[in-house]
Amino acid sequence: MFSMSADPIDVDGLQAELKDASAGACVTFEGWVRNENEGHPVQSLEYEGYEAVALKEGAKILEEAIEKFQLSSAVCTHRVGHLQLGDMAVWVGVSSGHRGEAFKACAYVIDEIKTRLPIWKKEHYTDGDSGWVNCEEKSPAKS
């Protein structure tokens, strides 16, 4: 299940969706709003997304991960709207029979989400400047 919401992420509810008697491992990822990006002091972020496409493509990414890594389950949600420092912007969770596949799958999901989804962020800097950027353009995981 992939979702987008302006509401804070309900980690307990999402993690409950991963429980399965066949799963021996659960790996999760939380992406938080931090106070700096590429040398720019960040005050807050705004996320916008093309929801219809993001929901469809997000579901496709989770299906790919389930098949590729033989997962029991995969869930992801991404926030939209204005977020403050420390707020959780994205949550990914996967469950599988073994930890190795779960770690690989979780990394796969967040990397694909950042690359393929039409979700953009506007960084608000402490000097009053701001700018819209595609999440992938400033993703340190890809450097």
Image: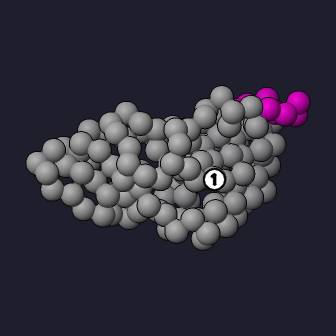
In the foreground, 124 or 107? 124
> What is the count of numbered marks?
1
Which residue was labeled with disc 1?
A: 3
Q: Which amino acid is tagged 1? A: Ser
At x 23%, y 45%, the residue is 42
Residue furthest left in the image: 127
Give the quadrant of residue 11.
top right
* Left or right position of 133 against 103: left
Magenta-tinted stretch: 19-26
For label 1, the SS is strand
Could you say where residue 90 lies in the image, as x and y percent from the top left? 51, 45
**Residue in the picture at 59% in, 48% down:** 77
- Residue 43 lies left or right of residue 8; in this view the side is left
Mark 1: few, some, or many residues within 10 Å (few <14, many ≥20)? some
Q: Position of residue 133 (x, y in %)?
A: 32, 63
Residue at x-position 33% and y-position 49%? 45
Q: Is residue 86 magenta?
A: no
Q: Position of residue 39 (x, y in %)?
A: 18, 48
**Magenta stretch: helix, strand or loop mostly:** loop
Quarter occupied by the C terminus: bottom left
Q: How is the image coloured?
A: one colour
Task: Judge left or right: residue 37 versus residue 54.
Answer: left
Residue drawn 21% across the image and 57% down it: 130
Q: Position of residue 54 (x, y in %)?
A: 58, 65
Q: Is residue 118 above or below residue 87?
A: below
**Location of residue 101 with respect to 86 vertically, above or below:** below
Q: Using the rendered image of the protein, determine whether residue 100 is visible from the camera's viewpoint.
A: no
